[in-house]
Amino acid sequence: MIIFNKSISLSLLAGTLMFGLAPAYVAAAEAQFVLNNCASCHVLTQTEKDTLQSYMSRKGPDLYYAGNKYREAWMVKWLQNPQRIRPGGMFFGNHTEVTDEGDVIKEGSLPDPVHVKLSKEDAQDSAAYLMTLTAKSDLLAEENYTPKKISKRMGAMNFSKFKGCSSCHRDRPDYGGVSGPELYTAAERLQENFMTSYIRNPQVWESKSLMPNRHLPDKEVSKLVDYLKLLEEK
Amino acid sequence: MKTSILALTLLAATTGSPALLAADAENGRTLYRGYCAQCHGLEGDGFGVNAPDMEVAPKDHTETAEMQARSDADLFKAIKQGGKAVDKSVLMPNWDANMSDDEIRDLVAYLRVLSNTGAK
């Protein structure tokens, strides 16, 4: 069923490309490479609404708004040398084992190797194509993050104690929750305005995101991104 | 899975609570696995994968006596508005943006199954 739907969306996309609606500067060959090699795990054009079930069984993160989410330089680097981003996998529940000491991420249950590894050229071409996928631009237009100085100590306390982010996310390799993506690499991976927008309202990006909306005012959203940026500068 | 449906039916039959009669504990179970188990544990014992580094321990939802002390309205409020709204830790998040009131009622029904307590 899923495969059937995918092939429809693929031919639709291929159709749009052939009719020349895709940005002119992306060669069809680059788009085709991504369609052929990546669409089995990543959503490249949104066709259906997520349900909790479909969200929990995703094979990879949605990339249909990749151009509004990721930093191209990071993608080029990561695709050549992928390192795990989500310590509990795409959905922690699919990798969790109940033990006498509490629930743990099952040893050996996460994909190994972490991800397909691309040559430099393929990585550059794929990243360039992914940057043209810019659904949800209107959401970024609403953001205007301006960096402010923050102390690492206060930032860390805010991240864990006051906002509770560290329950699910790590701000260093050896501390924090494992159900969400690690965040000590967030600023390297993600665009600033994407980070503020997602923290402000995760569900406008992913309707079934497991992240709560803590209804934070602008100032508090910015403070969290200030901290994530500080982590990148280590 | 079948036993929880049975438990719920029995429960609903004995208490006759209109809210719980309408609620779907089986759906609550799915929601629990998706949103709650990361902290509260797949079996609801408070030992989820995120629990080891947390400064406040997630509540053990299998604790019959303690769960008995909470009304359905208390549980609903804690889930929808977060721990802070019921004078508990902010580390218990608010889930109002993740699910509808009906879904939260399904979760409350499932918590009653997990803790083996009746609707209140």
Image (cartoon, rainbow, N blue to C red):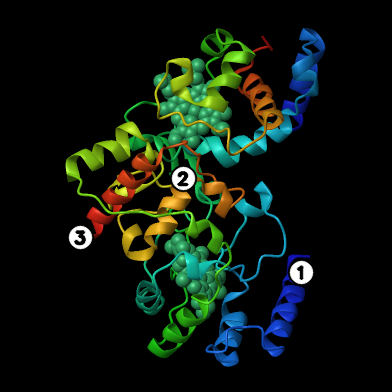
Q: Mark 1 points at which residue?
A: A5
Q: Name the residue under label 2.
A: A200
Q: What is the chain identity of the residue bearing mark 1? A: A
Quarter that holds the N terminus of chain B:
top right
Q: Counting residues from the N terminus, which is met first, the one under dot 3 or under dot 2?
A: 2
Q: Are marks 3 and 1 in contact (CB under 8 Å)?
A: no
Direction from residue A144 to residue A14 in the image, left or right: right
Disc nearest the viewer among 2 and 1: 2
Q: What is the chain identity of the residue bearing mark 2? A: A
Q: What is the chain identity of the residue bearing mark 3? A: A
Q: Can residue B63 be seen in this view?
A: yes
Q: Which residue is drawn at 27% across and 49% down?
A: A227
Q: Do the residues labelled 2 and 1 touch (CB within 8 Å)?
A: no
Element type where label 1 sits in the image: helix
Label 3 – label 2 distance at C-alpha: 23 Å
Q: Counting residues from the N terminus, which is met first, the one under dot 3 or under dot 1?
A: 1
Q: Which amino acid does label 3 sit on?
A: Glu
Q: Can residue B43 be seen in this view?
A: no
Disc nearest the viewer among 3 and 2: 2
Element type where label 3 sits in the image: loop
Q: Mark 3 points at which residue?
A: A233
Callouts 3 and 2 in the same chain: yes
Q: In the image, is residue A36 above or below residue A178?
A: below
Direction from residue A24 to residue B118 in the image, left or right: right
> Where's residue A201, x and y in %?
51, 46
Q: Counting residues from the N terminus, which is met first, the one under dot 2 or under dot 1?
A: 1
